[in-house]
Structure formats: C-alpha cells, structure tokens
Image (tube, rainbow, N blue to C red):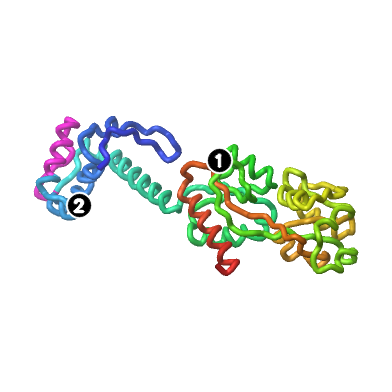
C-alpha cells in the first residue's frame, strides 16, 4: 500500500503538494483516506465497512486516528446518521482529489503496461511507408486505439541518424543495421533491374549484372543505395551513373521516360510496373528489411508495434 511519504504531481507535471502537507496523514494509506467519504455517503460505519471490505472497528479506529492527527473533528454522529463537520467538509474535497489522482495514476500505469498509452515514433523509408505501413497501422490501431503514432519518412541515411540520435523509437532498416541496435529481420526483398519496355535488355528473361555497366544508370544517393551498390560491387560492375536522386519514385519516372536503367527493390515497384520492363538479376541479389530498436528498454507500446509489424509481414507472406 502506498503511504504519504511521496509527492503528488498533476498529469501535466505540476507539483500539487506533498500528501503529508495536504492531509497530515503520513501514517495512513491512500485506501484509508476513502473511509470518511464512504462513511458519510452510506451514513453508517457498518455499511462503510461492508462496502470497503473492512470492519467497523477498523473504520472507527482510522477515523479517530485521523481526527487526532488533524487536531479537529471530521464527523458528527447522531440519531439521524453521520454528518461532516465544517472542518470535515473543508478537508474532504482534498481527500477526494488525492484519491482521484491515485485512480488516474493507476489507470495510466495499467494503460502503459498494456500498450494502450504512449507514443510510437516510427521511421520508414519510402517503399515500406507506402506498401506496408498503412496495413500495419490499421492493424495496430484496432488493437491499441489509445496509442499514438508519429511517422518519420526518409532514406537509409535518415533512418540511421534518427535511430542513433533517439529521434525515433524504432525504424525500418536494411541489414546490416547500425551498431547499438536490436534488429528483427522481416523479409528478403529481391533487387530487380528496370528499364524502358523497348530497351534491348528487355528481351532477356533475366539480366546479367555485368550488362548494366554501359547504359546510363539512374541511382539513389550513395548513402541511400547500399544494397544496390553492394550487388554491383560484388559483380565487379561500375555503373555509368548519369543521374542521382534521393527520391525512389523519381527513378521510376525517369526510367519510364527512357533516361536510363536502374536497379531497385521489388517492394518499391509494387503496382508501378505498367510502363516498365522488370527483370530479375543474375546472379540474384536482395536486401534484408528489418526493424531496428535502440538498445535499452522501450515502452510496451513500442514493443507492441514491433510485434504487430512482424505478424503483419508474416501474414502477407503466408507464414
């Protein structure tokens, strides 16, 4: 049972008073502060004891102890029942305020424990933000309607920086993840070659990576294209980079206009292939999409979103 050797703060962080200063009852529990109210409400020590799962003698003892500590009488007992004294009527609202704050605190703590309170600051790169997050968020909100989500959209470099600096609670990354992170692998996302439909390589069923070294190549910024450049480097190919952009969808538009070819993750082009020739690479290459959570103990609501993300991806892949 909590005793009154603590300090009570309002939910906005405002110091109210020490409980000891408010009621002078440093030797009594919060539960016992409810005895005067229930006794007056029910008009009987016996009924108050029954309602609060105590005994008449215990209720009487606590009321007497409170009156002795305060130095004045709280209740008057007569044939018509039990009534507050003038002093008791002045003290009772403060008691009720303390009890209400305690109930609010208990509810808030339970909400936090059950992931029904708190904010998830979530970072995601474009393909995940567009094709995964809407479904994940809908599923998460149906289970945790009181939780809040704040979304940050950026590239790989942004994700790493936000995670390191604590700007986000968890972020979607590709492996290997930044140091100091707990990672949860989600799926392998194949890398594919994209080109205009009338491109000479579009006649092939799969594209040898070595064939991508001569044509104008449209690339993401180096800091955002780890997976693509890793595949090219492994094949010993140095692309003829003509255009560089931070925008994934700008690459698709530029390829559609015949300005060059590129390599992109398959997730990115989901639903956007009508004006593109899309071919698997030879040898195959992919990126591993994962969730990264900074080391430490995150809020339960953050862990709950991570579980939702894992379950959602598994559901999409039929696992």
Q: Which quarter of the figure is the C terminus placed in?
A: bottom right
Badge 2 crowding class, 10 Å Cα cut-off, few under 14, some 14 to 19, many 20 or more, is: some
Residue 122 in percent (x, y) is at 59, 49
Residue 266 in percent (x, y) is at 72, 61
Q: Mark 1 points at which residue?
A: 180
Camera-nearest label, 2 or 1:
1
Q: Is 13 situated above or below 213?
A: above
**Spatial separation of the CA atoms under disc 2 and disc 1:** 51 Å
Residue 184 in percent (x, y) is at 55, 53
For the point 66% across and 60% down, the residue is 131
Q: Mark 2 points at which residue?
A: 52
* Foreground of the two, 134 or 146: 134
Q: What stretch is highlighted in magenta?
A: 60-81
For the point 29% across and 41% down, the residue is 93
Q: Is mark 1 on a helix, strand or loop?
A: loop
Q: Which quarter of the figure is the N terminus placed in?
A: top left
Q: Is mark 2 on a helix, strand or loop?
A: loop
Q: Is 125 situated above or below 136?
A: above
For the point 39% across and 32% down, the residue is 15
Residue 240 part of the magenta segment: no
* Foreground of the two, 25 or 189: 189
Dividing the picture into quadrants, the one containing residue 36 is: top left
Badge 1 crowding class, 10 Å Cα cut-off, few under 14, some 14 to 19, many 20 or more, is: few
For the point 42% across and 53% down, the residue is 114
Point out the tag, 2 or 1, that comes first from the N-terminus. Answer: 2
Give the side of residue 90 with respect to residue 289, left or right: left
């Amino acid at each position: 049972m909590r005793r009154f050797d603590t300090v009570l703060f309002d939910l906005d962080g405002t110091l109210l008073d020490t409980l000891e200063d408010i009621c002078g009852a440093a030797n009594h529990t919060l539960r016992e502060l409810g005895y005067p109210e229930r006794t007056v409400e029910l008009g009987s020590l016996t009924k108050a004891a029954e309602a609060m799962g105590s005994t008449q003698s215990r209720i009487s003892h606590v009321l007497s102890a409170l009156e002795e500590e305060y130095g004045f009488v709280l209740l008057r007992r007569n044939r018509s029942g039990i009534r507050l004294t003038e002093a008791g009527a002045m003290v009772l609202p403060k008691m009720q305020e303390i009890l209400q704050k305690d109930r609010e605190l208990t509810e808030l703590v339970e909400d936090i424990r059950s992931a029904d309170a708190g904010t998830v600051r979530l970072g995601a790169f474009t393909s995940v933000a567009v094709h995964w997050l809407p479904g994940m968020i809908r599923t998460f909100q149906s289970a945790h309607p009181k939780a809040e989500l704040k979304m940050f959209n950026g590239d790989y470099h942004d994700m790493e920086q936000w995670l390191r600096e604590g700007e986000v609670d968890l972020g979607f990354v590709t492996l290997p993840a930044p140091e100091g992170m707990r990672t949860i692998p989600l799926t392998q996302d194949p890398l594919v070659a994209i080109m205009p439909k009338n491109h000479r390589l579009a006649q092939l069923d799969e594209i040898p990576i070595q064939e991508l070294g001569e044509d104008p190549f449209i690339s993401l910024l180096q800091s955002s294209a780890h997976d693509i450049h890793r595949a090219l480097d492994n094949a010993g190919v140095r692309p003829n980079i003509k255009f560089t952009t931070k925008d994934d969808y700008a690459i698709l538009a530029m390829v559609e206009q015949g300005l060059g070819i590129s390599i992109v993750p398959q997730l990115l082009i989901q639903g956007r292939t009508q004006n593109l020739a899309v071919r698997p690479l030879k040898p195959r290459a992919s990126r591993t999409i994962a969730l990264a959570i900074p080391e430490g103990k995150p809020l339960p609501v953050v862990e709950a979103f991570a579980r939702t993300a894992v379950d959602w991806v598994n559901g999409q892949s039929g696992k």
